[in-house]
Image: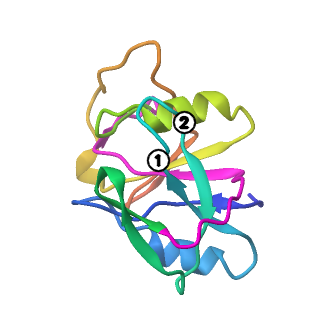
Amino acid sequence: MSGSVSGYLPIRTELDPLPTMARLGTDRQIGVPIISAPERPLTFALWSPETRLVPADFNVNIPDPIIPMTPRILIVPLLAFDRDGYRLGYGGGFYDRTIANLSYITTIGFAYSVQECLAVPRDETDQRLDYVVTERETLKIS
């Protein structure tokens, strides 16, 4: 896979993608999501390990200054996932709205293997991931 990547700045017990993002950033643009408002898709800002971060709404940090970018690959945090490629997040729907609006994007969920469940509850707005990466395996969702 090639192209710009957006990861995330981990909160709570999310799997930390920052080492992966730093390695990928040697030959491509790396970004992080920005929450602009409730019930809106995410936007994205450039990030590097040296980027200054400041606190923002929703208890997350964001780059300062914000330099917009457009990812082709989206690394997605999650609380739980199933082998059908569905995930549970924190319930805001930000990633589902974003994935639905970006049909060209490849999505990769980052999780611990213990976060796998038999079936994630879902509705018509939930979007499937293309891959799930854990410390044990990489699942390609078909």
Q: Is residue 131 above or below residue 31?
A: above
Left/right placement of residue 80 relative to residue 30 reads left
Above-or-below relation of 125 to 59: above
Magenta segment's dominant SS is loop
Depth check: 11 or 114 in front?
A: 11
Circle 2 Cα neighbour tier, 10 Å, few/some/many (<14 / 14–19 / ≥20): many
- Image location (x, y in percent) of residue 115: 26, 47
How packed is label 1: few (under 14 Cα within 10 Å), some, or many (20 or more)? some
Q: Residue at x 60, y 54 (%)?
A: 44
| Residue 19 picture location, percent across and down | 47, 78
Do tag 1 and tag 2 residues touch (Cβ < 8 Å)? no
Q: Does residue 82 belong to the magenta stretch?
A: yes
User: From the viewer's perspective, is residue 100 above or below residue 77?
Assistant: above
**Which image quadrant: the C terminus?**
top right
Q: Amino acid at mark 2?
A: Pro
Mark 1 or mark 2, earlier in chain = 1
Label number found at residue 27: none
Residue 103: image location, x then y, percent: 71, 31
Is residue 49 depicted above or below 3 in this figure? below
Q: Please check the rendered image and state whether residue 125 is part of the magenta-colored stretch, yes or no.
A: no
Hey, which quadrant is residue 38 in on the image? top left
Pick whichever, 25 or 36, lies toward us: 36
Image point (75%, 38%), residue name: 104
Residue 142 in view (yes/no) = no
Q: Look at the image and give the residue range highlighted in magenta.
A: 63-85
Residue 35, label in figure: 1
Question: SS for tag 1?
Answer: loop
Residue indicated by mark 2: 41
Q: Within the image, what quadrant is residue 140 found in?
A: top right
Q: Amino acid at mark 1?
A: Ile
Between 58 and 21, the one nearer to me in the picture = 58
